[in-house]
Image: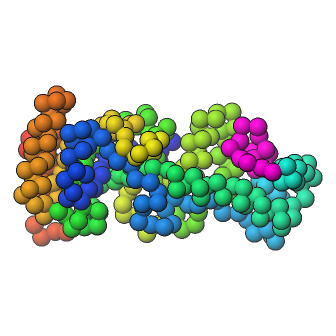
Amino acid sequence: MTSGKEPEYLYRYVPPKMDWIRTPIVYQKIFFPSVKQFNDPFDCATGIRFPDPDHLSGSDIWDLRKLSEFILEPDADTELDGRWEKRLQELVNDGVFTGDDFDALLREVNGPAVVRRDEQRFLCLSEDPKNIPMWSHYADKHKGVALQFKPNHSQMPIWGTRVRYRKAVPSLAEFMTILRRYAKNDDRRAVGIFRIFYGHKHTMWRCEKEWRVMTDSSDGYHKLPAGPLSLTGVILGLHVQPDTVSGVNKWVRQAQRTLRRKLRIYRTTRLPDSFSLRCTAQDGHTL
């Protein structure tokens, strides 16, 4: 369920905070921030976009009725009082939709999404290891590192998603398309709903080329490999400081002795007469 070419590696930009760098290398644990810690308040759309209640088309009414049926399913994750449940059932039966119904339905669908939004934890990654704005912002003016992960794309439909960029949050029609498409597959339907609510950002963030992976860890730490991700290397920023370099070298040696698995260390250089970067490993491998 990904679109476009699947990247060979994904990258997590990290500022020069020693614990943040050492923990995934030596202890093979990575921290998944909660959505509340994201820097964009619009990130992870807090619901779906409903049609104008004063100008509902026939297809809008149909979608609203089917959405009501979905909410009324015995295993739906909803908490309805008896009066609202009765009104929804009447809506399913007669298709007559009032303004009060609309407001209640909006709260029932988008309200829990807001609550769950603050409970979600994601690891945000990029396809691009040479993204200058990412190095500048997330890696403290190129003084930090980028952790390189090898993704197992066969597990990505379960654990994560490529972020889609758009100017408006997903619509009710898109949400209902997911419900209909995977009506007989609860797992795929759950993945589709997850992507509707948490897999979109505004188009101005498109340069990040983001992927995000989720965890159900209560404290935010997840043992590597985390879902579909395995740590394979560390890229040193263009302006990395000597203490960070020595720390990374020591921790990678320690991890390789313990894990008996090769981790590459890349140095970043600026290409002459260009606004571009090159990442070169000690064994000559380049990105």
The residue drawn where x is 24% and y is 38% is 27
Q: Is residue 153 magenta?
A: no
Q: Which secondary structure type mostly characterizes the magenta part of the structure?
A: loop
Q: Is residue 107 left or right of residue 99?
A: left
Query: 276 or 254, which lies in front?
Result: 254
Q: Is residue 164 visible?
A: no
Q: What residue is shown at x 17% (from left), y 59% (from top)?
A: 237
Q: Is residue 254 above or below residue 272?
A: above
- Which residue is at the far right? 94
Q: In the image, is residue 73 part of the stretch drawn in magenta?
A: yes
Image location (x, y in percent) of residue 50 = 71, 63
The correct choice, above or below, for 162 with respect to 37 in the image is above
**Visual colour scheme:** rainbow
Q: Residue furthest top?
A: 260
Residue 4 shown left or right of residue 245 in the figure? right
Residue 176 place in picture, x, y as percent: 70, 50
Would residue 10 be visible to someone looking at this image?
A: yes
Question: Is 126 located above or below residue 189 in the figure?
Answer: below
Q: Which residues are magenta?
A: 67-81
Residue at the spot x=91%, y=48% of the render? 93
Vertical side of 134 occupied by 175: above or below: above
Left or right placement of residue 110 versus residue 136 in this view: right
Quadrant position of residue 136: bottom left
Residue at image location 12% in from the left, 36% down from the top = 254
- Number of callouts in the render? 0
**18 vs 230, nearest the viewer:** 18
Which percent across, then down, holds residue 193?
60, 47
> Residue 191: x percent and y percent?
56, 42
